[in-house]
Image (spheres, rainbow, N blue to C red):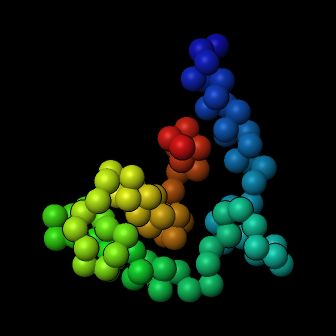
């Protein structure tokens, strides 16, 4: 087995045991959604620059690739569309 395959297999096994986004467990847990997801999405949206990048401030100029990656990943998380195995491998 290749090392990358072993990492992917381990990540999948770990994530299969973790609560899924939106799962109600009575207390905040990894993978739980915030109470007002629409407000969170709006907070991110107002930080998108005209050129498509993202800024740490509303209406600011695009910053680094990190801000863009974080914004896109956060939006996918808020919409319940993030592939959890991919996220573990990328981060």
Residue at left offset 76%, top offset 73%: 28
* Quadrant in which the N terminus appears: top right
Near-viewer residue (29 or 60): 60
Quarter of the image where one finds residue 22: bottom right
- Judged left or right of residue 67, residue 76 is right
In the rendered image, the vertical position of residue 39 relative to residue 11, given as above or below: below
The spot of residue 55 in percent (x, y) is 31, 68
Near-viewer residue (41 or 18): 41
Residue at left offset 39%, top offset 52%: 66
Q: Count the marks.
A: 0
Near-viewer residue (56 or 8): 56
Q: Which residue is the extreme one toward the left?
A: 51
Quarter of the image where one finds residue 53: bottom left
The spot of residue 14 in percent (x, y) is 74, 43
- Judged left or right of residue 38, residue 13 is right
The spot of residue 21 in percent (x, y) is 64, 66
The spot of residue 25 in percent (x, y) is 81, 73
Residue at left offset 57%, top offset 23%: 4
* Quadrant in which the C terminus appears: top right
- Judged left or right of residue 36, residue 24 is right
Residue at left offset 61%, top offset 18%: 3
In the rendered image, the vertical position of residue 3 relative to residue 32, given as above or below: above
Q: Which residue is the extreme one toward the top?
A: 1
């Amino acid at each position: 087995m290749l090392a990358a395959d072993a990492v992917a297999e381990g990540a999948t096994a770990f994530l299969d045991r973790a609560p899924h986004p939106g799962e109600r467990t009575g207390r905040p847990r990894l993978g739980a959604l915030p109470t007002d997801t629409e407000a969170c999405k709006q907070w991110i949206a107002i930080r998108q620059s005209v050129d498509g990048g993202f800024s740490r401030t509303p209406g600011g100029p695009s910053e680094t690739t990190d801000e863009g990656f974080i914004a896109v990943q956060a939006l996918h998380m808020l919409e319940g569309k993030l592939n959890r195995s991919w996220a573990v491998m990328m981060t």
